[in-house]
Structures are given as structure tokens and as C-alpha cells.
Image (spheres, rainbow, N blue to C red):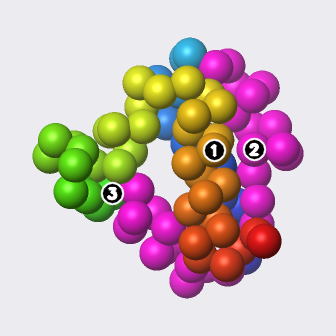
Amino acid sequence: MQWHHIVGQFSSNVERFGPGAIHDMENMVAVPKDLHFQINGHYSSKLPGLGGQTVREWLAPQSFQAQRDYGLQVLRNYGIIP
């Protein structure tokens, strides 16, 4: 198992939302290593409709709640949470 941050722990999020919000246990979930690799791959992918940006780049300017909502949906899509 590995820890996954629902709202990403990249530097711009830590600066905007604070380390307490990013590293809070409400923002972290344990996921199997193989699924964590796949989830990270999703965030690095360039999906249609994102203007050539990766998912991570597209999410970066969005609010904490918008990033959290998206992250929870990704976890549902991978069967991590119901």
C-alpha cells in the first residue's frame, strides 16, 4: 500500500492551501501500489478537452474543493472507495 493525496501534494497546492490541508489524513488514502501507479498515470495523461494540458496541469488552478471532488471521483473509478 502507498499513500495517495486526494488533492495533490505538488508545491503550488502546498503554497495555496497550506501543508496542513494537503497532508491532513482527510486528504490521504492508502491504495495498492499497482493502482497508485495507474492513478498517477491518469493525472499525467493528456485527455481530450484539456487544451493539451495534463490532468494535473488542468486541475492546478482549480479550488481545493474542485480538486478534491475530482480526486474522489478518480478513486471511485479505480474502485478504491465506493
Locate residue 16, reporting x and y percent.
56, 16
Distance from label 2 to label 1 (Cα)?
Answer: 11 Å
| Secondary element type, mark 3 | helix
* Residue under label 3: 44
The amino acid on which the numbered mark 3 sits, given as a three-letter code, is Ser
- In this rendering, does residue 11 appear at all? no
Q: Is residue 64 above or below residue 7?
A: above
Quarter of the picture containing the N terminus is bottom right
- Farthest residue to the bottom: give it: 34
Assess whether residue 30 is covered by the magenta stretch: yes
Q: Choose between 18 and 75: the one closer to the eye.
A: 75
The quarter holding residue 7 reads: top right
Q: Badge 1: few (under 14), some or many (20 or more) residues near its Cα, within 10 Å? A: few
Quarter of the picture containing the C terminus is bottom right
Closer to the chain start, of discs 3 and 2, is 2
Q: Residue at x 65, y 31 (%)?
A: 65
The quarter holding residue 47 reads: bottom left
Q: Residue at x 55, y 83 (%)?
A: 34
Looking at the rendered structure, which numbered label has been put on residue 69? 1
| Circles 3, 2 touching at the beta carbon (< 8 Å) | no
| Secondary element type, mark 1 | helix
Locate residue 72, reporting x and y percent.
66, 55
Locate residue 69, reporting x and y percent.
63, 44
Mark toward the viewer: 3 or 1: 1
The amino acid on which the numbered mark 1 sits, given as a three-letter code, is Asp
The amino acid on which the numbered mark 2 sits, given as a three-letter code, is Asn
| Secondary element type, mark 2 | helix
Looking at the rendered structure, which numbered label has been put on residue 27? 2
82 relative to 39 in the view: left or right: right
- Which residues fall within the magenta stretch? 17-43
Closer to the chain start, of discs 2 and 1, is 2
Q: Is residue 53 above or below residue 38?
A: above
